[in-house]
């Protein structure tokens, strides 16, 4: 009986090996083919086309003529471009730090709740704004910041701070800060999900041991939680900075780049140059420069991150 069962098992294994070995190696990659085609068609081809047209005088209707580095020479001498680049760097830095910090605080608070139903309720609360269209949120905030009858100024007047009420979007020294604070203190749903998931993966035994050793909750956050979720946090920061460098909608809908280019960004400037002035060659030069900046930042950040991880493993 034993020998018969062994023979049956070996026969079954041989059949499975034949089936598995009969599948060509390239078959699994066929399932990736539609995604690869879409990625090439809607990402890589437009990117290479933009790089090519940045060396031409294309206006969208004429036959593009090669002009060499003329567009880039004009770009580097353009004060509006440098102003927009400074604005987007300030906006991205402030916005990324703010949303990441708020997402971490929210994730930490939810993580420390002992009631699973409460945890689920707060997760839904923090991620629900992700389903609201960004345009709707931006229009609401434009009304909040309105100089007359705006919710922010009316609230300041109601509590006796009339001197603080001002045209937040109409002054160069407050417009960019006002855009940074859009959504505050709402938490970025994506950042919250990533950080919250990373915290949930932490070993409960380590937390229990730290409590037994007399470690306070605040000390545990800095000694255990933060070092354990560095990887996901860096991912959130990188994606946040990449998104911030390409920011476009808030400036277009709320301020249109004003006042006096105080909220102008390369993405908005690209749009205005292309579709208002018809200088598509110059616009693609702006887009190419922004793409290079974004790629360079991502490369050096990831390299530093992996180098740090390698050093830790070696030690």
Image (cartoon, rainbow, N blue to C red):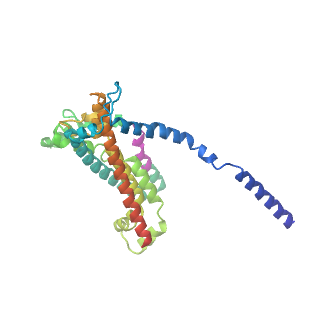
For this orientation, the residue located farthest to the bottom is: 213
At a point 29% along the width and 48% down the height, the residue shown is 92
Q: Is residue 135 left or right of residue 205?
A: left
Q: Quadrant of residue 137?
A: top left
Q: Is residue 125 magenta?
A: yes
Which quadrant of the figure contains the N terminus? Answer: bottom right
Considering depth in this image, is 202 or 117 the residue closer to the camera? 202
Which quadrant of the figure contains the C terminus? Answer: bottom left
State whether the magenta stretch is mostly helix, strand or loop.
helix
At a point 55% along the width and 39% down the height, the residue shown is 34
Magenta segment boundaries in residue numbering: 122-132
Q: Residue 53 placed where, x, y %? A: 35, 35
Number of numbered markers: 0
Q: Is residue 235 magenta?
A: no
Above or below for 155 versus 102: above
At a point 42% along the width and 56% down the height, the residue shown is 232
Q: Is residue 147 left or right of residue 251?
A: left
């Amino acid at each position: 009986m034993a020998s018969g069962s062994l023979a049956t098992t070996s026969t079954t294994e041989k059949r499975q090996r034949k089936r598995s070995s009969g599948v060509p190696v390239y078959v699994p990659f066929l399932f990736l083919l539609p995604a690869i085609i879409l990625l090439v068609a809607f990402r890589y081809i437009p990117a290479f086309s933009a790089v090519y047209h940045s060396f031409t005088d294309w206006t969208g209707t004429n036959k593009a003529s090669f002009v060499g580095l003329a567009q880039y020479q004009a770009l580097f001498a353009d004060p509006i471009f440098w102003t927009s680049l400074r604005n987007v760097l300030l906006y991205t830095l402030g916005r990324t730090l703010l949303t990441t910090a708020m997402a971490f605080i929210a994730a930490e608070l939810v993580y420390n709740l002992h009631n699973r139903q409460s945890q689920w309720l707060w997760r839904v609360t923090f991620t629900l704004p992700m389903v609201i269209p960004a345009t709707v949120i931006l229009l609401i905030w434009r009304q909040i910041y309105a100089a007359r009858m705006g919710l922010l100024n009316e609230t300041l007047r109601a509590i006796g701070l009339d001197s603080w009420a001002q045209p937040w979007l109409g002054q160069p020294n407050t417009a960019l800060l006002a855009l940074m604070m859009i959504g505050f203190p709402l938490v970025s749903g994506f950042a919250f999900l990533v950080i919250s998931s990373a915290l949930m993966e932490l070993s409960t035994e380590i937390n229990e041991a730290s409590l037994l050793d007399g470690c306070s909750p605040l000390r545990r956050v800095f000694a255990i939680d933060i070092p354990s979720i560095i990887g996901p946090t860096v991912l959130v920061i990188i994606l946040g900075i990449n998104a911030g460098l390409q920011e476009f909608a808030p400036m277009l809908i709320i301020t249109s780049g004003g006042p006096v280019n105080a909220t102008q960004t390369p993405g908005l400037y690209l749009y205005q140059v292309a579709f208002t002035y018809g200088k598509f060659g110059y616009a693609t030069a702006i887009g190419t420069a922004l793409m290079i900046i974004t790629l360079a930042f991502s490369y050096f950040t990831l390299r530093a991150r992996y180098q740090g991880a390698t050093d830790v493993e070696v030690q």
